[in-house]
Image: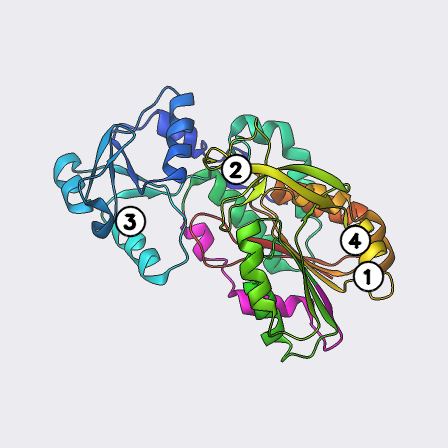
Amino acid sequence: MEKQIWQGVEPSLWRRLADMSKPLVLYGMGDGADKVIAQLNRLGLSPHGIFASDEFVRGQQFAGMTVLTYQAAKQHFGDMCVLVCFGTEQPEVLAKIAQIAQEQEVYAPHVPLFGTELFDEDFVAGHEANLLAADALWADDFSRQVYRDYLAYMWTGRVDYLFRSETAKLDAWQELALTDNEVFLDLGAYDGDTAAEFAALTGGQYQAIWAMEPDPKNFLKLQRQLADMPRAQALQMAAWRQSGSLSFAGKAGRNSALYKENDEQAKVKPGAVTQAQTISLDDLWQQFMPTQPPTVIKMDVEGAEEAVLQGAAALLAAHQPKLAVSAYHRTPDIFRLPLLINQLNPDYRLALRHHPYIPGWETNIYAK
């Protein structure tokens, strides 16, 4: 493997920000901005200002700063370093970011959705052997390009690395070569949108759909979605490495997750943490589907992917179901998850695809 940008060709974004002479100005509010501010504070830095899209300004204050429009920020700060602090896949918003990047120095810092590990000099020094080992696992050249571009993005914060290795999500499903005999297991089913997408992709020709969602409000939406889908069942539980119960932070949206008090996440409202029933995929297979094990598993479980895979060791070894696994919730996931899948079943063919999104969300492993 040739020397990559994250192997010391240039300093990481965080080291460059520490030496930045331009004012650091945030673009966007909310949890993402909170995370970027927290990381800047760890470096002894603070943002100089913040702006948002015109329709979101409305005289708001955020983190003690007045939220400006971009034009007002440009008038006030002039030449600035813009840090994008929100996630988007909307083409018009992506175009706006690209437009601002023509006038300013723009980065979309990688801050993990779960945990606090940054992809910086210390992280690479501690994980370089695993980073290189994962690079050797990809089954095709494009996956290796996606992997290296994703690492380069995390290192530099430059979104052009994401743009140049994008794949439409529907195209990525083709990696799994779906048939009309699939048993689909949807983990982190939310409101059933992926189950509906799967049904459409197969033209309604499938053996069964099992969809798991622990959030009570999401589960009601999921039940409504599945009501008109034949051979589809919903389970109100969370996949985990073992069966039992765990604290769960329900947010009635896509960010609901198994909850750890020492794990930095999006803000949790008082009373939102409850208990959720958990089940390992090995137990799910034996208890619910012993004669019809899953043939396709989608895994978007908000940072619990490693634990869920560990709880599926027997299933993956015995039946090698096709996998679509989110690889972006925690910084080490991009190498830790392919290494784990390969360990559980070395016969898997691993592909990596990134779907249009800023920051590097929607980066998924497809295995068959």
Determine if residue 332 is in view: no
Sequence order check: which comes first, mark 4 or mark 1? Answer: 4
The mark found on residue 284 in the picture is: 4
Where is residue 214? Give x, y as percent: 62, 49
Q: In this view, does 21 lie above or below 140?
A: above
Q: Mark 3 points at which residue?
A: 101
Where is residue 95? Give x, y as percent: 31, 58
Where is residue 147? Give x, y as percent: 58, 50
Q: Are the residues flagged by discs 4 and 1 in contact, CB closer than 8 Å?
A: yes
Residue reaching furthest to the left: 75
Per the image, label 3 sits on a secondary structure element best described as helix
Where is residue 2? Give x, y as percent: 60, 44
Sequence order check: which comes first, mark 3 or mark 1? Answer: 3
- Kindly identify the residue that appears in the image at 55 percent across and 25 percent down: 122
Q: Quick check: 25 left or right of 17?
A: left
Q: Residues within 10 Å of mark 4 (few under 14, many from 20)?
A: some
Q: Quadrant of residue 184?
A: bottom right
Q: What residue type is labelled 2?
A: Trp
Sequence order check: which comes first, mark 2 or mark 3? Answer: 2
Q: Residues within 10 Å of mark 3 (few under 14, many from 20)?
A: some
Sequence order check: which comes first, mark 4 or mark 3? Answer: 3
Part of the protein shown in magenta: 159-184
